[in-house]
Amino acid sequence: MMRRRGVRDMLVVPLEEAGIRSPRSAAARSFYWKGWGRVLSGPAVGCVVSMWRGSKKGAYGHVGFVVGKDRFGNLMVIGGNQGNRVSIRPFNRNRVLSYHWPATHEAPKKQGLSTLPIIASDGRVSKNEA
């Protein structure tokens, strides 16, 4: 049986291996709670997106890397535990808490939904990240 890939495997370890200090937490909302990196005004390819799960004010969340948008205007995010696997899935933008970029690297000049590439999707947004 394959092991589920969560925040630690999908974001924390790759960031640390690339020499970028992460929040060093397996909690999905740690990027948001700890104000990790630079907070961006909008999405950018490669940025970390922090989202709420269950309730906007609740303790649960989900994080991943933004890779684009779909033709329906959803964010396309690569992450773990998306349907119990690593995948690229569409997410409704109303779930976004914040977008982040490593503080040690220059923020992307192009930010915002209009700057993202369009990636094929059926438009069914992710609802299973636990």
Image: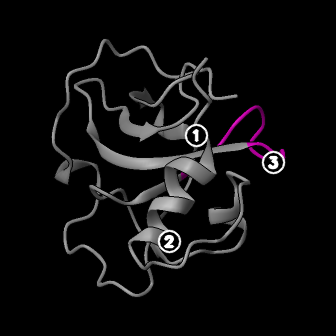
Q: Counting other residues with Cα less than 10 Å from the Cα at mark 2, is it few (<14), some (14-19), or many (20 or more)?
A: few
Q: Which residue is mark 3?
A: 57
Q: Do the residues bearing badges 1 and 2 touch, measured as CB atoms within 8 Å? A: no
Residue 47's label in the rendered image is none
Q: How many marks?
A: 3
Amino acid type shown at disc 2: Glu
| Residue 126 image point, x, y percent | 52, 22
N-terminal label among 1 and 2: 2
The relative height of residue 81 versus residue 14 in the rendered view (above or below) is above
Amino acid type shown at disc 1: Arg
Nearest to the observer: residue 70 or residue 48: 48
Q: Residue at left 53%, top 61%?
A: 13
Nearest to the observer: residue 25 or residue 38: 25
| Residue 22 image point, x, y percent | 57, 72
Residue 95's label in the rendered image is 1
Give the magenta-colored segment's residue range: 50-60
N-terminal label among 3 and 1: 3
Amino acid type shown at disc 3: Lys
Nearest to the observer: residue 27 or residue 9: 9
Q: Residue at left 62%, top 64%?
A: 31
Q: Quadrant of residue 56?
A: top right
Q: Residue at left 45%, top 58%?
A: 48
Residue 16's label in the rendered image is 2
